[in-house]
Amino acid sequence: MKEAYDKMSSKTKQFVDLCYESDATIMMLKATMMDKQSVINIHLDTITVLKQELATTKIEMERVNNKLISYTTSAYVLDHIFQNQTKENESEEKVIGNGKRLGYHRVPPPFRECYCQKKLKAGGGKGAKHQIKICSKPN
């Protein structure tokens, strides 16, 4: 019986030692898992920030592309349509002997009416005022 008791005691001691080793291994694995989980969380946060930056950059790129298209369209208007209009105006102009062109040069025609000063009203004193009349033809 003593042999059985000694055998059982040694087996119990081995089992307790194995349990302590298992607990230590489990604690070490939990700590390793927590470290790896925190690294994963940091990477996930970085991915989220990068996705937001990518979305912002895509929006900015789209805005710049739209401006570029607008500028290209404006350049087309200036190069083709405006140029055609100026060619039409040039064909209507007349060239005189010294090479100068006569015609409309994007400047409005001169004002044809002139303002002439009329004589003072009768009485001619300090209270007299000048009257202005509009002449249809210049003097």
Image (cartoon, grey):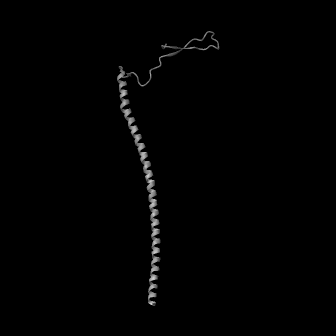
User: Please, which residue is most extreme toward the bottom here?
Assistant: 2
The picture places residue 102, in percent across and down from the top left corner, at 38, 21
Viewed as shown, does residue 59 lie left or right of 130? left
- In this view, the residue in front, 138 or 88, is 88
Residue that appears at 45% across and 63% down: 37
- Residue 117, placed above or below residue 16: above
In the figure, 70 relative to 128: above or below? below
Q: Residue at x 38, y 33 (%)?
A: 77
Does residue 91 appear to the left or right of 127 in the view shown? Answer: left
Near-viewer residue (82 or 119): 82
Left or right of 126? Residue 29 is left
**In the rendered view of the protein, which quadrant contains the N terminus?**
bottom left
Residue nearest the observer in this picture, 133 or 52:
52
Where residue 45 appears, as percent x and y from the top left, is 46, 57
Q: Residue furthest right?
A: 126
Q: Residue furthest top?
A: 122
Q: How many marks?
A: 0
Looking at the picture, how far across and down is residue 89, in whole percent? 37, 24
Instruction: Give how far across and how far down residue 46 sits, in percent.
Output: 45, 56
Q: Classify 59 as above or below 127.
A: below
Q: At 36% from the left edge and 22% from the top edge, which residue is drawn?
A: 92
Determine the image quadrant of residue 119.
top right
Q: Residue at x 45, y 85 (%)?
A: 8
